[in-house]
C-alpha cells in the first residue's frame, strides 16, 4: 500500500462532502460555510491523582450552529486529536440534518485511557473536564449537549450532568445539558441500545426494498444472512444481538482487540459478550475458531459486514479483499474515502455512517425533549389508551359469547392489545419511524438521479440540502 495515498479520517469526510456538493448548485460561499468547522476549543487541565498532578488535554469542536443546541458525543481515548474531533463534529452536523434532529454538529474528546484509572479517579477527571467545558458554555442545555461515545457511557454522563447542576443551581433544565444518562438521573428508556437498535432498523428498511437488495447482489430477507461484527462494544453487541434474536440473522464472525472468533454455524452474541466482560477479550471462547489476526476476518465470506468500532478499519489496503455484499457503518468513518471508491467499483452497497449509527442521536433527542418537558413519555396517555382498547375488547367478548365456538380470540390477543405504550415502546417507535423516513429520503435520491450511484452520496446530498435551507432561512 502507498501510505501517502490513504486519506486521513478528516480528509475522507471532506472528500465525500466535496463529491456531493459537486452535484449541487450551492453558492461557493455557502458551500464553504457548511464545510468548515466553526470553532474548536482545546482545554488543558491538571488533576491531582496518586500523589502528583497529571495534565490532560481535551477538545470540544463546534462544526455548525445553523441549529442550536449543537449535539455530539465525548470520547475518551489516547488517540483523540483535533482533526478527528473536527471530522466527527462535521459528521454530526450531516447526521442530525439527515434524521431531522434539530441540532447543529459538535464533538468532544479527552486524551485519556479509561483503563489506566480506577472509577474514583475517572470521576475526578470527568468532573474537571466538564467544569472546563461548562464554564465556556460548551456544555449547556440550549447551546451544547454532549452524549456518550467511544470510551464513555451513562456513568460519565451522570457525572457531567451533576457537575453542570452544581455550577448552575437555579437552572431548571440542568438535566438537559447532556444525554445518555442513567434512567435514575434523567435518562430515557432505550438509550443504551439505541445505536445498535438503529442499525437493526436501518437493515430492516433496506430489506423492505427488493430493488435495493438486488443492488447488493442478494435476495430474500434478513433471515439466515451471515453477519460479521467488528467491535462488540455497546453498538456492535446490540446490533448483533437484535439481528440474531429478532430477525434470524447468523452472526458468523466477531472481531475484537485481541483477535476474532469465527463459526459458520453462528455465534451466541450474548455468550461472547459475557466472555469478553469476564476475561477482557475473546481469546479462549469455546465453540468457535479463534485467530489472533482479527482484521483478517473482515475479509471472510459473509453477506453483511458491520464495522462497529474505530474509523479507517476498511482502507485501501484491504478493500479489494472484502467479500461482503453489504456493509453497514455502525461506527463513524470505518471506510476511508479511498476504500469507498474501490468498494463502489466492486458493486458493494454501503449504508453510510451518518445514517446507520444515527439511532444514538435520535434517542438522545428524545431524552433532551423529555428533560425539557419534565415528564416521561407515556405517563399522560398510556392508561387512557388502554381504557379505549378495553372498550373494543368488551364488545369482542359479546361477539365471542354470541358466536360461541364459531369465532374466538387468539389466546394472547387480549393481553397484547390491551397493553398501552410505555416509554420504551414509544422510543422504539420514534426511532423506527426516524430510520425509515431518513432511509427513504436517501434511496429516493439514490434511484432518481443518474449521477448518484451510492447511498453515501445520496445521504450527503439530502443532509447538505437541509443545512443549506437552514442557513438560507437565517438570511445567509
Image (cartoon, grey):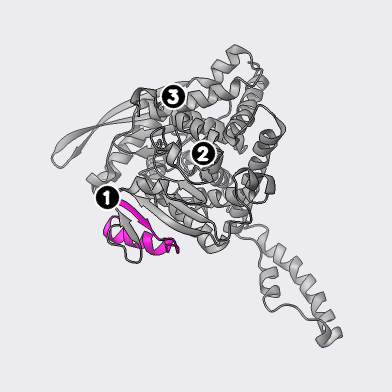
Residue 47 against residue 301 in the figure, above or below: above
Whether residue 61 appears in magenta in the rendering, the answer is: no
Q: Where's residue 117, x and y in %?
A: 23, 45
Q: Position of residue 449 (x, y in %)?
A: 70, 30
Which residue corresponds to mark 2? 353
Where's residue 214, x and y in %? 64, 46
Distance from disc 2 to disc 3, alpha carbons, whole Å, reads 16 Å
Question: Which label's residue is closer to the chain start, 1 or 3?
Answer: 3
At 71% from the left and 63% from the top, the residue drawn is 384
Residue depicted at x 63% and y 15%: 476
The circle on residue 119 is 1
Q: Is residue 22 visible?
A: yes
Residue holding disc 3: 11
Residue found farthest to the right: 402
Judged from the image, the secondary structure of the residue bearing numbered disc 3 is helix
Q: How much space separates mark 1 and mark 2, taking CA atoms?
A: 31 Å
Local packing at callout 1 (Cα closer than 10 Å; few below 14, some 14-19, many 20+) is: few
Q: Position of residue 349 (x, y in %)?
A: 56, 41
Amino acid at each position: 500500500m502507498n501510505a501517502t495515498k490513504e486519506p486521513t479520517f478528516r480528509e475522507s469526510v471532506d472528500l465525500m462532502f466535496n463529491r456531493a456538493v459537486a452535484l449541487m448548485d450551492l453558492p461557493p460561499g455557502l458551500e464553504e460555510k457548511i464545510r468548515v468547522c466553526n470553532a474548536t476549543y482545546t482545554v488543558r487541565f491538571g488533576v491531582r491523582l496518586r500523589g502528583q498532578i497529571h495534565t490532560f488535554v481535551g477538545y470540544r469542536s463546534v462544526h455548525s450552529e445553523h441549529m442550536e443546541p449543537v449535539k455530539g458525543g465525548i470520547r475518551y481515548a489516547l488517540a483523540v486529536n483535533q482533526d478527528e474531533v473536527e471530522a466527527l463534529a462535521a459528521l454530526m452536523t450531516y447526521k442530525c440534518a439527515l434524521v431531522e434532529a434539530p441540532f447543529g454538529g459538535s464533538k468532544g474528546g479527552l486524551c485519556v485511557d479509561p483503563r489506566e484509572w480506577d472509577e474514583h479517579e475517572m470521576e475526578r477527571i470527568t468532573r474537571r473536564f466538564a467544569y472546563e467545558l461548562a464554564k465556556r458554555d460548551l456544555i449547556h442545555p440550549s447551546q451544547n449537549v454532549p452524549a456518550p461515545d467511544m470510551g464513555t457511557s451513562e456513568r460519565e454522563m451522570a457525572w457531567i450532568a451533576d457537575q453542570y447542576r452544581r455550577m448552575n443551581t437555579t437552572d431548571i433544565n440542568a438535566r438537559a445539558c447532556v444525554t445518555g444518562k442513567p434512567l435514575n438521573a434523567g435518562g430515557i428508556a432505550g438509550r443504551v441500545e439505541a445505536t445498535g437498535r438503529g442499525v437493526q432498523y436501518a437493515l430492516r428498511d433496506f430489506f423492505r426494498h427488493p430493488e435495493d437488495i438486488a443492488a447488493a447482489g442478494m435476495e430474500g430477507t434478513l433471515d439466515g444472512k451471515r453477519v460479521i461484527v467488528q467491535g462488540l462494544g455497546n453498538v456492535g453487541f446490540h446490533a448483533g444481538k437484535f439481528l440474531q434474536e429478532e430477525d434470524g440473522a447468523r452472526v458468523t464472525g466477531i472481531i475484537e482487540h485481541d483477535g476474532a472468533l469465527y463459526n459458520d454455524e453462528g455465534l451466541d452474541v450474548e455468550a461472547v459478550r459475557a466472555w469478553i466482560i469476564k476475561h477482557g477479550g475473546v481469546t479462549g471462547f469455546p465453540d468457535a475458531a479463534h485467530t489472533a489476526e482479527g482484521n483478517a476476518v473482515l475479509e471472510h465470506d459473509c453477506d453483511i459486514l458491520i464495522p462497529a468500532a474505530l474509523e479507517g478499519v476498511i482502507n485501501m489496503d484491504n478493500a479489494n479483499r472484502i467479500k461482503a455484499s453489504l456493509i453497514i457503518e455502525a461506527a463513524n468513518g470505518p471506510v476511508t474515502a479511498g476504500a469507498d471508491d474501490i468498494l463502489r467499483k466492486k458493486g458493494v452497497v454501503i449504508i453510510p455512517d451518518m445514517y446507520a449509527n444515527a439511532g444514538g442521536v435520535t434517542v438522545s433527542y428524545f431524552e433532551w425533549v423529555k428533560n425539557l418537558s419534565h415528564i416521561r413519555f407515556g405517563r399522560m396517555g398510556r392508561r387512557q389508551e388502554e381504557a379505549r382498547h378495553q372498550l373494543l375488547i368488551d364488545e369482542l367478548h359479546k361477539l365471542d359469547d354470541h358466536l360461541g365456538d364459531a369465532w374466538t380470540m387468539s389466546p394472547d390477543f387480549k393481553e397484547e392489545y390491551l397493553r398501552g405504550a410505555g416509554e420504551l415502546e414509544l422510543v422504539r417507535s420514534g426511532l423506527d419511524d426516524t430510520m425509515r423516513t431518513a432511509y427513504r429520503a436517501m434511496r429516493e435520491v439514490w434511484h432518481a438521479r443518474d449521477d448518484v450511484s451510492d447511498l453515501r452520496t445520496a445521504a450527503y446530498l439530502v443532509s447538505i440540502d437541509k443545512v443549506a435551507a437552514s442557513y438560507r432561512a437565517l438570511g445567509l
